[in-house]
Image (tube, grey):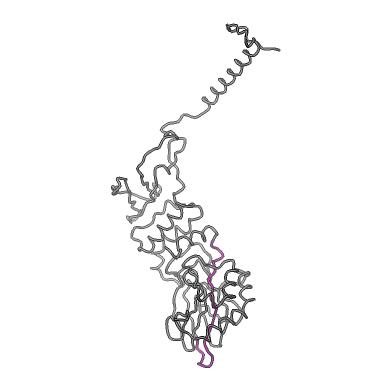
Amino acid sequence: MQWTLDFLPLPPCPELGAQPLNGLLWALLVLFLWYCYRVGSDPPVTGRTHPGKLKSSCVRTRQMSRSSSCSSTSDGIDAGGSTTKTALGDSGTPCIAMAMGEEEEEEDTDGGRRRGYLTPVLSYALFPTQAPPASKKLYSALQEYAKRYSWAGMGRIHKGLRDQARLSDRSSIQKPHLFFLPDVPSIPFFPRDAHRHDIEVLEANYPIILAEFQAVYQRGIDTKLGWTCQGPKGQAVFPLYNAGVCVAANCRSCPCTYRTLLSLRTFISSNSLGAAGFWLLGPGVTLGGGYGPTNTRLRCHLGLQTPPQCELVVGGEPQCWSEGHCLLVDDSFLHTVSHNGVAEDGPRVIFSVDLWHPNVAAAERQALDYIFSPEQ
């Protein structure tokens, strides 16, 4: 059946003819009907700011917590004229709210607000204002990291920074003094399978690592030669990496050992939590109980010279070193080191390397590299 528009009072158009004009009118009619369908199917928009307009030049801050996590707020005006809020927790403890620009907030179709990309994963748990300055500095670094990248995967780090002050007050055999990552399985000594590749690399290079140590040891233990004396007499360190910074002169003295470090997959070389070097402990020296700075790392001890009567006790569990073999130690547990041998035994020597804890995710490692960067 052929459809026509003869029933419409159309003026004659001899230049185009009847058929082209009828096709054009049909196309316009179809477009009009499609437009009416789209307009009728869209939900009504109430209170939405047009996406093409700028909302406001001033920056507001909004409270991070849900309505159930805080009982009251106090408002104030900062020097720039923007409103800030300090939240009060259920116990009346003041908390730091997350500052967010109005352009970073988003609206639901029903007019309600939903979290923007800067909102912490644990937004209901606020950071306490009475936290130590060091913890506040680390939390500020975490916020800067989230602004550049994302809060995705930062839940445990956010919780660890928030609870660090309370951790230092409790009695425990595991109490890292700088940063504790919660929900990380921890034991004093880890099996070899936790870092099999790196352990096999270190043990395969044991002869050359030992030879390079003996070369620098025979030159003498002197601070001018790259050594660092720590604690009691008889304890010294020849660092290749110190707090995430490469000691270039010492690495040039041990080039093969340095290349071995670079071949490790989990060596912490980019933040202040990581170190590597030769550790000496003289006869008759005992190092009292202490805690490492964090539970996000494992210390790998490669035994170079291990006289008898040397012992390492971590979390109440004793172990002895063995030449050419590695121990994986979580030094965030209470630990002591002792060398009860005689002078003829010589010093105990290990090559210590800090490796990532196997349960720290890749996103968390990247964030910790940023938070604990040597420049922070």
Residue at image point 45% right, 45% down: 116
As drawn, which residue projects farthest toward the front?
15
| Vertical position of residue 181 compared to residue 114: above or below | below
As drawn, which residue projects farthest toward the right?
1
| Vertical position of residue 96 compared to residue 58: above or below | below
Q: How many marks?
A: 0
**Which image quarter is the N terminus in?**
top right
Front-lying residue, 206 or 316: 206
Report which quarter residue 16 is drawn in.
Answer: top right
**Which image quarter is the C terminus in?**
bottom left
In x, y percent, where is residue 9?
57, 6
Q: What segment carries the magenta color?
A: 339-360
Q: Is residue 152 magenta?
A: no
Front-lying residue, 102 or 263: 263
Report which quarter residue 165 is drawn in.
Answer: bottom left
In x, y percent, where is residue 369?
49, 62
Front-lying residue, 2 or 169: 2
In x, y percent, where is residue 150?
49, 51
Q: Is 114 placed left or right of 359 in the picture?
A: left
Q: Is residue 347 magenta?
A: yes
| Vertical position of residue 5 compared to residue 177: above or below | above
In x, y percent, where is residue 146?
46, 53
